[in-house]
Image (tube, rainbow, N blue to C red):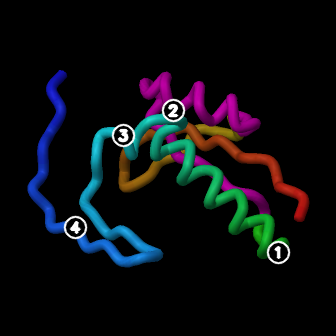
């Protein structure tokens, strides 16, 4: 796979750098991991929410593995936008 190069203007101040995505920005856990953690944190701050759920295509083994690593457990089969999916429920986070 080759890296995609984007020519996007960067703006830099003493306290902030605004720029387009770079390959090194995606090192570490990945976007799905960051999104799941952000959603769980949001749910923890709003305790009236009953945790967070992930809708995952049954054949998407990488997303299923990530959901399991984050503590989510298979809840049931479902559909999303008329497409079959598996629903995983993430545990509630303590604030």
The earlier-in-sequence mark between 4 and 3 is: 4
Q: Determine if the magenta segment contains residue 64.
A: yes
The earlier-in-sequence mark between 1 and 3 is: 3
- Judging from the image, what secondary structure is the residue with disc 4 in? loop
* Region of the chain picked out in magenta, as a range: 50-73
Count of numbered marks: 4
Whether residue 18 is situated above or below residue 30 in the rendered picture: below
Front one among 21 and 38? 21
Q: Which circle, 4 or 1, is nearer the viewer?
A: 4
The earlier-in-sequence mark between 2 and 1 is: 1
Whether residue 38 is situated above or below residue 72 in the rendered picture: below
What is the distance, in whole Å, between disc 4 and disc 1 at their CAs? 40 Å
Count neighbours of disc 2 (C-alpha within 10 A) and say few if under 14, some if 14 to 19, many if 20 or more: some
Q: Which residue is mark 3?
A: 24
Q: Residue at x 56, y 29 (%)?
A: 64
The earlier-in-sequence mark between 2 and 4 is: 4
Quarter of the view holding residue 72: top right
Q: Which residue is mark 1?
A: 48
Image-based side of 62 in relation to 75, left or right: left
């Amino acid at each position: 796979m080759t890296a995609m190069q984007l020519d996007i203007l960067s703006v830099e101040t003493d306290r902030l750098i605004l720029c387009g995505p770079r390959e090194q920005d995606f090192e570490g856990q990945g976007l799905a991991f960051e999104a799941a953690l952000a959603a769980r944190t949001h749910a923890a701050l709003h305790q009236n929410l009953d945790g967070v759920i992930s809708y995952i295509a049954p054949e998407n083994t990488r997303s299923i593995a990530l959901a399991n690593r984050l503590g989510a457990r298979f809840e049931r089969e479902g559909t999303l936008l008329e497409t079959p999916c598996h629903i995983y429920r993430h545990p509630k986070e303590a604030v």
